[in-house]
Amino acid sequence: GAGGYDVTLTIAAAKYRSDGQGVESEIPIADWIDIGVFGEDDSVLYLEKHRIDAKEMTIDVVVDTKPVEAGVDPFHKLIDRNSSDNRKKVQL
């Protein structure tokens, strides 16, 4: 972009419901989820909720400062069995 950095996130998301007996079944996702882009020293360059309504989707954001990491639900507000994959290094 003009004087900015275009960050494209490809998001793979799935939502499951547990029946209380430990059996999980996948259900459609249509949730507002935080998308974050972070710079040096974990500074927040972008943090907005996006509606995630497909198992895979692409989100484009523009930030003014060089991005280092980007991710979905970066502050782990949602229950996630594997939250270690929520943030990734940005490939420049």
Image (spheres, rainbow, N blue to C red):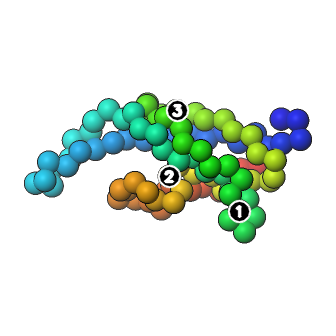
- SS at circle 1: loop
- Distance of mark 1 from mark 3, alpha carbons? 25 Å
Residue contact between numbered discs 2 and 3, judged by CB atoms under 8 Å: no
Element under label 2? Answer: loop
Q: Nearer the viewer, residue 91 or 62?
A: 62
- Residue 66, position as x, y percentages in the image: 80, 53
* Residue at (51, 60) in percent of width and height: 75
Sequence-wise, which precedes: disc 2 or disc 3? 3
> Is 23 situated left or right of 47 in this image?
left
Of callouts 1 and 3, the N-terminal one: 1
Three-letter residue code for mark 3: Met
Residue at 54% x, 56% y is 74
Location of mark 1 (residue): 43
Q: Callout 2, which amino acid?
A: Asp
Could you say which disc has been placed on residue 27 in the image? none
Disc 1/disc 2 C-alpha distance (Å)? 15 Å
Q: Which mark is residue 57?
A: 3
Q: Measure the alpha-carbon separation of dots 2 and 3.
A: 15 Å
Amino acid type, residue under disc 1 in the picture: Ser
Residue that numbered label 2 is attached to: 73
Secondary structure of residue under mark 3:
strand
Would you call the spot at circle 1 few (<14 residues within 10 Å), some (14-19), or many (20 or more)? few
Coordinates of residue 31 in the picture (x, y in percent): 41, 38
Against 42, residue 73 (above or below) is above
Write the residue at 47% across / 35% down. 52
Residue 73 image point, x, y percent: 50, 52
Kindly indicate the quadrant of the structure image that contains residue 43: bottom right
Mark 1 vs mark 2: which is more N-terminal? 1
